[in-house]
Amino acid sequence: MRIDILTLFPELIAGAFQASIIRRAQDAGRVQLRLHNPRDYTTDRHRSVDAPPYGGGPGMVMRPEPWFRAVERLRLRGLPGRVVLLTPQGERLDQPRVRRLAAEDRLILLCGRYEGVDERVREHLADDEISIGDYVLSGGEPAAVVLVDAVVRLQPGVLGSDQSALDESFSQPLLEYPHYTRPPEYRGWRVPPILLSGDHGAIERWRREQQLERTRRRRPDLLAQSAQRSTQGA
Ligand code: 6GU
């Protein structure tokens, strides 16, 4: 999979791609990540990427030309790609959408700044508009890192075992059971004895109960969703 990211601040993102799973996925050739700056696609002397809003009001708005030029240039080489604008006004990112995006051959991510992007970019360039939650970021860059991480770890061969992606929270969708490792007692806090019992059936039942109990307490909305899905037969 190939992911192109357009941002005025590539340095906000670059570091996140240089360690751990995203780094390994690139090294293994599972994913190609490229950063581009819309400023490099301006045509005026001042390389201007924003301007005051028509109709007045505070702040600046990002002009459409650099975005269109950049995307059109990128598309001259390779697959067209799905264009995703990261904006607090987008639809909320969740695991089903992550799965759909992960199945694309190419994504082109546009990182808006909070003050706004000319409406013509949304209307005529973006295929999707995505937000990562109900809070305000100064720009789409952290959201792009979140999206890339979520999508890259679903690429075949990226996680140690393909099972790890399936088992986790939101694929089911229940929260994870609690995990423990050595030592069996730390500062007086013991690992639940059942995990040391060797009784695999009992361990599996305990983990399932923990998942349900945790989800009921912390995220009852997830249980409501999965109940809804099962009555819809989906
Ligand atoms: Cl994608 N952008 C901004 N600026 N704020 C956000 C967001 C995106 N998602 C949540 N908050």
Image (tube, rainbow, N blue to C red):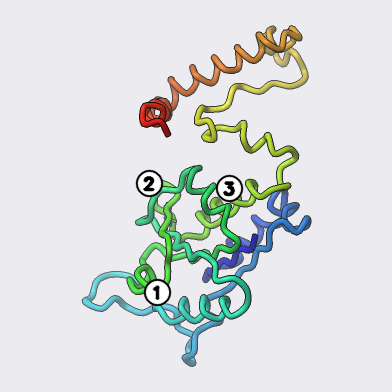
- Residue 90, quarter of picture: bottom left
Q: Amino acid at mark 1?
A: Met
Asked whether the beta carbons under mark 3 and mark 2 sit within 8 Å of each other, the answer is no
Q: Residue at x 66, y 23 (%)?
A: 179
Assign ligand 1 to one image quadrant: bottom left
Q: Secondary structure at mark 1?
A: strand
- Residue 49, quarter of picture: bottom left
Q: In the image as oriented, which residue stretches furthest toward the left?
A: 55
Q: Which mark is residue 150?
A: 3
Circle 2 sits on which residue?
A: 134
Kindly tell me whether mark 3's CB lies below 8 Å from ligand 1: no
Q: Nearer the viewer, residue 78 or 49?
A: 78
Circle 1 crowding by C-alpha within 10 Å: few under 14, some 14–19, many from 20: many
Circle 3 crowding by C-alpha within 10 Å: few under 14, some 14–19, many from 20: some
Q: Which of disc 1 and disc 3 is earlier in sequence?
A: 1
Circle 1 sits on which residue?
A: 62
Q: Quadrant of the C terminus?
A: top left
Q: Nearer the viewer, residue 11 or 180?
A: 180
